[in-house]
Amino acid sequence: MNNAARERILRAGAAIMHVKGFQGTGLAEVLAAAHAPKGSFYHYFPSKEAFGLAVLAHFEEGLGAMGQEVLALPGLSAQARLDALVERFREFFAGRGYTLGCPIGKLAQEMGDLSEAFQQHLAARPTPLTRIMAAIIAQGQAEGDFDPGLEAEEAARFLAGAWQGALIRMKVERGPGPLTLFTRYAKRLLATSGETPTP
Amino acid sequence: MNNAARERILRAGAAIMHVKGFQGTGLAEVLAAAHAPKGSFYHYFPSKEAFGLAVLAHFEEGLGAMGQEVLALPGLSAQARLDALVERFREFFAGRGYTLGCPIGKLAQEMGDLSEAFQQHLAARPTPLTRIMAAIIAQGQAEGDFDPGLEAEEAARFLAGAWQGALIRMKVERGPGPLTLFTRYAKRLLATSGETPTP
C-alpha cells in the first residue's frame, strides 16, 4: 500500500470533514482534493466509516500533540499556560475567520447517534483537551493557585465541555468573544476558595 | 396553504434532523414521515434551507417554552430551579437512551459555516438556554445564594456553552454523568465568594 497516498487522502478528508461533517463529505471530492485516482479509495480504507474513524484519530493526534507542546512550554505558571493554550487556538481560528470550531466535537455531535463505531471510539477515552486541561489544573493545584479540593480530571471534563460550547458560539458569532469568556470563567472556577476573582 | 400539513412536515423534519442533521435529512423521508404527498414540499417551504431555518426556530420555541415553565415553577430557590431545569432535560434524554443532545447546538455545529442564513439567525440572539440561565442566575443573586459580582447574562453564556459540551459528552457516553457534573460545577461557579463549595 502506498502510505503517502493514504496520508494525502486522510489529510484531504480531514480538511473537508472539518467544514462539511462526515455525511456531507463525498469520497470523490476527497480523492480529487488528494490528487488520488478515482476509485482508489477502497484500496486504502475498508469503508467510509473506517475512513471517518481514521480522520477522527488524526484530529485527536494533532490536538494531543499541540497540547503536549503547550504543556512543555518552560517557565509558565498554570494560569499562564491556560492563557497560552487558548491563545494557540485563538490564533488558529483567527486565521480562518473564526469558523470551523472543534472537529472532534463536530464529529461527536453528528455521528454519536448514527455510528456505534464513532460512539464507542469517543466514549472509550477522554478528549485530548480534557487530558491537557487536567494536567494544567494539577500544575495550578501544586502551585497553590488552583483549589486543591477540586478533582483535576473531573474539573477538566467540565471545562472541556465548556470549551466545546465556546467554540460552537465562536463559529456562530464569527469572533473570539466566547474564547475570552471561557478563559475568564475557567480561572474563576479553578481559583482557590476565598480568593475567587470576579471575572 | 394547508397549515396542518405544513406543521406535520415541520415536526417530522425536526425529529429526523435531530438525529441526522440538516445535510443527512432527505426531503422524501420527511414527507413520508409526515404522510404528505411526494412533491408537496415546495408548496410549503421555498427551499430546504428555509425549511431548516423553520425547524431551528421550532426547536428554539420549544426550548424557550420549556424554560418559561421551569421559571414559572412556584416556591423554588434559584439552586432548586437549576436542579429542576437539568432534571427536565435528564428525564427527556433518559427516555431516549441519552442520545440526541441539543438540536440547536447540532445545527449550529453543522451549519454555522455552511449557511449564512443559519449563522446569522444564530448570531442574532442568545440561545434559549442562555436566557433561562440568566433568569435563574439573577434570581439567585437577588436571594443572596449566587455571587452578586457576576454579570448574569455573561455567566449564563458561559454556562450555556458548558451545557452544550455536557450534552455532547452525554450522547457519547450514553449516560447522565455529564449532566450531573454540569450541575455541580455550575453551582460552584455561581456561589457567593468565600463560601465556594467543592463540587
Image (cartoon, coloured by chain):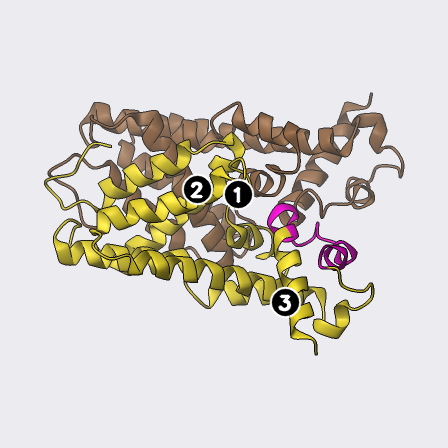
Chain colours: A brown, B yellow
Tell which tag, 3 or 1, sits nearer the viewer: 3
The residue at 50%/24% (across/down) is: A125
- Viewer-proximal residue, B63 or B74? B74
- Viewer-proximal residue, A195 or B143? B143
Residue designated by label 3: B7
The residue at 42%/46% (across/down) is: B89
The disc labelled 1 sits on which kind of residue? Cys
Is residue B22 rendered magenta in the image? yes
Of the numbered discs 2 and 3, the one sitting upstream in the chain is: 3
Q: Are marks 2 and 3 in contact (CB under 8 Å)?
A: no
Spatial CA distance of label 2 from label 3 is 26 Å
> As drawn, is A62 to the left or to the right of A29?
left
Which chain letter goes with mark 3?
Answer: B
In the image, are marks 3 and 1 on the same chain?
no
The disc labelled 2 sits on which kind of residue? Glu
The disc labelled 3 sits on which kind of residue? Glu
- Viewer-proximal residue, A126 or B44? B44
**Which percent across, then down, holds residue B78?**
22, 51
The residue at 36%/59% (across/down) is: B69
Q: Residues within 10 Å of mark 3 (few under 14, many from 20)?
A: some
Spatial CA distance of label 2 from label 1 is 28 Å
Q: Which quarter of the picture shows residue A116? A: top right
**Image: magenta residue range:** B16-34
Tag 2 secondary structure: helix
- Viewer-proximal residue, B112 or A89? B112
Residue designated by label 2: B91
Q: Are marks 2 and 1 in contact (CB under 8 Å)?
A: no
